[in-house]
Image: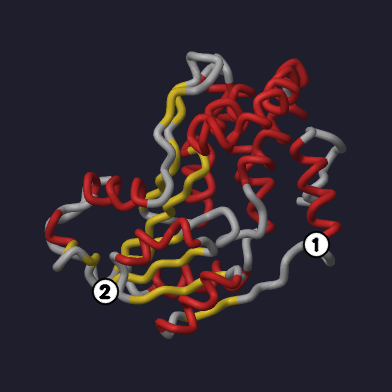
Amino acid sequence: MSLPDTPPSGIALFDMDGTLLAWDCQLLFRHHVLRAEPLRLFSVPLFLAFLPFAPLLGTENMKRVFHCFLWKMPPDRLQELSREFALKLFPSIYPELVGALEEHRSAGHLTILSSASPECYAAEVGRLLGFDISLGTVLENDFLFADLTNHKGVNKVTRLHQLLPESYFTEGKLVNSHGYTDSTADLPMLAICDRATVVNPKPPLLALAEKNGWTILQPERPWKSTREKALRILALLLALGKNPAKL
């Protein structure tokens, strides 16, 4: 997308996982791919074998291990599965966030989906929802453990500085901007926004939201108890069942 040097009337930044919908889409997408291509189930025991070493390897390296299910997948097949997944995901988007996005679009604001999930399907979700720009973690899957830079935390801000004209920033902040997230991992993104909305925040983020006067949204989640959520996440992690997330 070619952007004019003149800043837009407003800019809206949306996280995806936990913000636009309740789930971690990385688990959902792996389940979707493994149902379509069962030979890639080798990735599940491989990931579980590395899981005890997660504190040593760190988040970014574990993300490489987790995404080994995409190893050497042809680009056209990856795009096809990403499109199918986005369509499958679409009904689970929180209506409250769809409404907020529509308000920004109606006001002529630049809308940006900024996710830590792989960009292959984040872009498809963004396209369905009508975002102007969709950003995520770019994976190079030629190797068993994908080459990537995790699009999370301060990396989201760095990418925005690389993508947007400098005229869109004033004293380090995006002009007339509004950030949406569910996670403290996005505090660097919120720091460059004039306003913020937090979605189903955990206590640390809730405390910050109350202190700073941010908007708090609490849309209904698709599980009735913590136990039900844990069992469904476990089923997704182990690639069990036809549709543990009940999409």
Q: Which amino acid type is shown beneath numbered disc 2?
A: Asn
Element marked by disc 1: helix
Element marked by disc 2: loop
State the quadrant of the N terminus. top left
Q: Choose between 8 and 145: the one closer to the eye.
A: 145
Q: Choose between 208 and 121: the one closer to the eye.
A: 208
Up/down of 243 relative to 138, above or below: below
* Residue at figure coordinates x 24%, y 65% from the top left: 174
Q: Is residue 28 left or right of residue 124?
A: right
Rounded to the nearest angstrom, the CA distance separating label 1 from label 2 is: 37 Å
Q: Position of residue 31 (x, y in %)?
A: 73, 35
Query: Which residue is disc 2 drawn over?
Result: 176
Q: Nearer the viewer, mark 1 or mark 2?
A: 1
Query: Which residue is disc 1 drawn over?
Result: 226
Q: Is residue 40 left or right of residue 197?
A: right
* Residue at figure coordinates x 47%, y 49% from the top left: 115
